[in-house]
Image: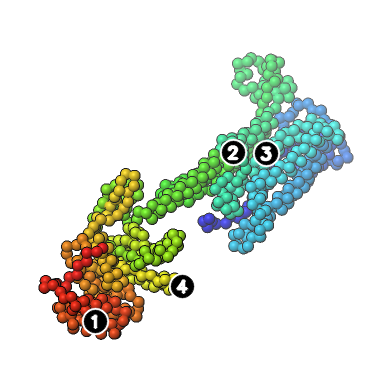
Amino acid sequence: MKNLKIPRYRVGRIFLFPLLMYFLLVLPLLFFMAFKEFPELSKRKGFLEQMQDTTQNVSSKVPLAGDTSKVNAQTENEISSSVDSRYIGFKYEYEPESTQVTGTTGIFSKLFNILGLITFLLVYILNIPFKRYFKRKRKGKVISPRLYRFCRKYILKTPLLNSGMVFIAFTVVHVIILYSFLFPTSPMDEVTRRMLTNFLYVSVVASMLSIFFIYFWQKHLVHIRYLEHIFTQNELQKRIFGKRTGKIRNRLYIASGMTTLFPLTIVLLYLLLSLTPVDNVKNPTASETRILLGSAVDLMGTSENLMDEGFNGLYYIPAIDNTLMFFGIFSGILVSFIYILFFVNWSTQGIVRPVNELVSSMLKTGKGLTGHYTLVRTNDEVGIMSESYNVMSLQLSEYITHISRLNEAYFRFVPRQFLEFLDKKEITDIQLGDQVQKEMTVMFSDIRGFTELSESMTPKENFDFINHYLGLMEPIIRNNNGFIDKFIGDAIMALFHDTPDNALRAAIEMRGMLQKFNNHRKERGLPLIDCGIGMHTGNLMLGMVGGKGRMDGTVISDSVNLAARLEGLTKIYHTSIILSEDTLIKLQDPSAFNFRFLDIARVKGKKEAVYMFELIDGDPEKVKTLKIESMPLYNNAIELYKKKQFEEAEKIFSKLLLFNPDDSVALFYLNRCRSIKQKGIDEDWSGIEVFDAK
């Protein structure tokens, strides 16, 4: 997995911010309701005494708590005139001894504090392992297997667990409020009932907003930031979120409800709370009627009988309520705007980032870079598409691997160089009859006496022997920029297209490998083997031969036949490596090799004689050294032989054998000189040996 920046695990802000949004929705409502019901609340016994610490102007006008009659009279006169004159003329029925609102508010406030503290502690304790995991991972410290297993097991459940705890806390509070509303311990007046109903409604809506906000924020962080640091890339190639498939459509529905529907319900409540029934105004004057109905009064007649004509069922918004209503609407719109910003960001990252990752992987695959996978971060349509791409990428990678292995298998039968020489990109492009002319060095190598050797082995031992031997020689040819055209039993036919130097180096290494091969056989008590190598450089035709049902790549040329004949002559001259004059003169660096003249011969199938040379670098080190030291003496003997001075040449060849008994070429010429002395030579003898056998 690529190196990613380890994020911090966030907990506090995920809970504090939604709770602030909750209070931003609820507190304006509480203030609004308290202000709206203040005229009625102010007439209750003890109300002003409870407000004394927070409302100094009012408390300075309130007599001692024992004088109840003065409290009621003064409250009715002063509050009505100075605080909210719109309630003048309204008729109220009070329960002077009731203090339910203030008492209930205090109980609920304590309950909120206790449950909030408990919820915070539980949430913090639950998230400690995840904070510890990411902290240790960020600092490069060792993570215990137990902690790792815990995080893997529960990281996907944290959105539900964290929001669930908050849901339980809010549910407990709302159930207690609902229970006190349905089953009050003492009679509940209309004001208290109305305030509790409105508060419960807004609190439920605001709490649901907070719970959903916590859930989706945590889920967003888990899917976008945390997953790849807990699960492996192989695991994230598939969906790990359960079998149930999500829908982007459902996510957008929820986002729309969170950002518009829920806040609008609270705004609607503010609108309803700001309305006041027209029938609260008893016997309105003409001026009051004009204020209530506006310019429509001029079209409806006199104002004295308007209220008797069905307008009592209407509502109006007092000036103070209007101000508070706009404040509440503003808070609802503000919360809605904040939620929109968050949800747009989450939806964008939750959809765009996985899609971008998927597109990036697709582009890499399109460029031929296989084995690229995208992380499956979601369980919706994008997740399904990402998972499907990973399956496709895996199958494509396996298919390409299979094709590559198949091509490699083909190239074991048809060398890759054939495609290059024939200017073909794929083996499927090759057609019967494709051919090209190239200058190459042809090498033939053959094991001497293999037929007799094979008779002493079983068929399996024959195959094991051949495969072992050829398996040692093939890499040498390949490493020297050559390739094997075909195996002919124990023989090898190889081609070198760059320079003859590569062929000579390969032949020398093959002879060295043969010595190691023989040492291994000697240790096992097996008979030793020898091989001869012949090389010639020239033009040849390389192409495809055969029929529609079976074809093969091969080379056809006189150069191929000559190389095969030179290899055969190694058995006659008892030397290891023979190369033609054409190969010698085309060497880029002749000084890098040690060779000596061998003979002039005309082989079967050739009209012209070929100058042959012995590459002595393929001999054992001791034999090679003695041949190099005796090179001047050898050249002198060859010169005498060509001048038909056979007796002098015989003496020098004898000296060469005394100096180097393993010089098989000197022994060959010594025997030839003796044979000529006995049988004589033709008058037209030119020193060219004719070999009619293959």
* Residue on which disc 4 sits: 525
The first of marks 1 and 2 along the sequence is: 2
Q: Give the alpha-carbon distance from disc 2 to disc 4, as whole Å.
A: 74 Å
Q: Give the alpha-carbon distance from disc 1 to disc 2, as whole Å.
A: 96 Å
Residue 477 placement (x, y as % from top left): 35, 64
Which amino acid type is shown beneath numbered disc 4? Answer: Gly
Quick check: 218 above or below 37? below
Which amino acid type is shown beneath numbered disc 1? Answer: Phe
The first of marks 2 and 4 along the sequence is: 2
Residue 224 placement (x, y as % from top left): 57, 48
Q: From this viewpoint, is residue 541 visible?
A: yes
**Marks 2 and 3 in Cβ contact (< 8 Å):** no
* Residue on which disc 1 sits: 653
Specify whether 69 is left or right of 588: right
Q: Quadrant of the C terminus?
A: bottom left
Which amino acid type is shown beneath numbered disc 2? Answer: Gly
Q: Give the alpha-carbon distance from disc 1 to disc 4, as whole Å.
A: 35 Å
